[in-house]
Amino acid sequence: MSTNSAVRVRQHQPGADIALIERALNIHDAPSSTAFVCIGDEISTEGQEGFLRGHGTQVVDGKLVATVCGVVERVNKLIYVKTLNSRYNAEQGDVVVGRVAEVAGKAWRVDLKSRQEAKLLLSAVHLPGGIQRRRNAEDELNMRSFFREGELISAEVQSVHADGSVALHTRSAKYGKLVHGQLVEVPPNLIKRQKQHFHTLEALGVELIIGCNGLVWVAPLRPSRAAGTSDSTTAASDGAGDATEETSAPPPPPSRAQLEVVCRMANSIRVLTRLYMPVYPASIMSTYEAAVDGGVALRDMLEPEFLEQVALQEGQRRSSAMQD
Amino acid sequence: MDIDVAGPGPGSSRSRGRQPAQLRSLVCERSVLDRADGSAKWTQEGSSVLAAVYGPRQAKIQKEDAERAVVEVVYKPRAGLQSHEDRSIELEIRGILEGVIPLGMHPRTSIMVILQVLQEDGSVLVCALNAACAALVDAGVPMSTMYASVGCALSSQEQQLLLDPDAAEEQAAQARFCFTFPHHFDLTQPATSSEPQQPQQQEAPPAAVAPAVLGSRCVGDFSCDQLLDAMQLCRLGCERVAAFARLSLSKSLMQAVGAAAGQ
């Protein structure tokens, strides 16, 4: 039995994280070339014939004016203001992780930690059996057999309407209910849109879903998933077959070793969040390996010493990347 | 989180030489709360208000509006339950925020602003308004303009206008005024600030306060001329508050973007 108390109390020092990042990465204040704007400031559109107005801007008297404080970004013809912390803005094709908030008349309302709840229509999920047929009243009554309130699901954004409401779909075997794992909330600004958001790390026995809305799911690898690594190419009938398999035989509860690995991965993601570093598989793996190589205990991963070590490592990586 | 200070030293009262048209020292701390989308704590020496902003997020079905965002304000006094005056303050603040936030951009959402009075020493509504503005900026809620708020009191004995009154002055006053003005940076004018500037910061353009009033709350016995004088005096005071808010904001932005540099 360990003599250490299970609960550790640490004093909250506001601003300590920023001080740590500044020390480790050796930067003080932003480079003078960054163009800040405040609310009400005019954004220059000179030298550009036409422009697309993006987030954080509005047109007042023919001039482009910022509505939030942040940095001006220009991508081709799109001009927008990037704030440091903002809620998730859905784009078509994003993979997201959300929690079912409500089951209401032919649709589930899913909380994506965004400005509005998203809708998952009954017609946008796979029916068991894989047959394409019209949804009838019986399907509507059995909606809770698919997803109940409070369950986590992974889905893809089908469309975003003009008023900001989002429609989701789970029309693929890889989307669906998420069980037996850990959810980590990350600011959505730290997650970049990439080709793959589902990662199976077979060496560790962990599956990772990086939702574009900032919710990251870490779970032990299920044997059925480990076998089917090419699930992106399976046909719809195979996908439906997998669904019936899983509902009939619930996955076995994970072992302690698997849970520790999952916990360590989740803590690595939390470390990256504290240091405001982008979250993607390579950065998560390098933090994980730093923890394992350094023999850092699971509970010590969020202590300032390990945070400093990771920040210093990142500083070295950046300086060597700049020298190349 | 960062703390920015401006104005005369602490403990400044009229008896110790604070001029009638001089503000007390201002302190603004941003990103004080972890779970809120944005937060700020605004202190004017003896008065301190903590503001938290949640939103824009999904509104409750009973409260949601299909075409615009809904602004909800909760104003909690330092001690005790909310009284009718606190409710009327909530209405006033909500009116100002609805004028400043483009509500049509986020339909079916709600923006909740929660204000908690931590210390009371006069000009509490002014503190609350300034804290709400700083918290909204911290949360990244789009606004068409920033605003600054200043209060003044008409003393009953000398019939003199005192800017930024403390609790004793407010009690002894014949009338109390609180004005809110929108402000923006005037990039066309060169920097001509009379306040001392820190050497390493670039020259900040002066903040231009618009002549139009965003909101006003006047209580007491006063004449028309006194009201207009109070408005002019508060406008001057707002210029200083706006300049301080701008400096504090740009400093916190530079710091935070520097820490996230190289992403």
Image (tube, coloured by chain):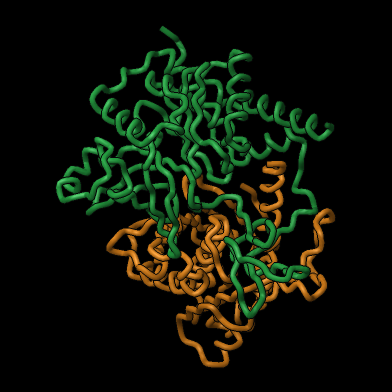
Chain colours: A green, B orange
Task: Determine the image quadrant of residue B5.
Answer: bottom right
Count of all numbered marks drawn on residues in the image: 0
Identify which residue is drawn at 68% across, 62% down: A77
Q: Is residue B178 visible?
A: yes
Is residue B249 placed above or below A124 in the rendered structure? below
Identify which residue is drawn at 50% across, 55% down: B50
Q: Is residue A224 left or right of residue A68?
A: left
Q: Quadrant of the N terminus of chain A?
A: top left
Depth check: give the residue in front, B145 or B8. Answer: B145
Q: Is residue B17 left or right of residue B150?
A: right
Q: Is residue B241 visible?
A: no
Task: Determine the image quadrant of residue A154.
Answer: top left
Depth check: give the residue in front, B81 or B37. Answer: B37
Identify which residue is drawn at 54% across, 48% down: B32
Residue A315 position in % (x across, y down):
74, 31
Q: Residue furthest bottom?
A: B224
Depth check: give the residue in front, A308 or A100. Answer: A100
Residue B107 position in % (x across, y down):
41, 65
Is residue A179 placed above or below A46 in the rendered structure? above
Depth check: give the residue in front, A14 or A299. Answer: A299
Q: Is residue B153 left or right of residue A3?
A: right
Residue B203 position in % (x across, y down):
81, 63
Is residue A159 placed above or below A15 in the rendered structure? below
Identify which residue is drawn at 57% across, 43% down: A193
Is residue A107 placed above or below A295 in the rendered structure? below
Q: Quadrant of the C terminus of chain A?
A: top right
Task: Determine the image quadrant of residue B78.
Answer: bottom left
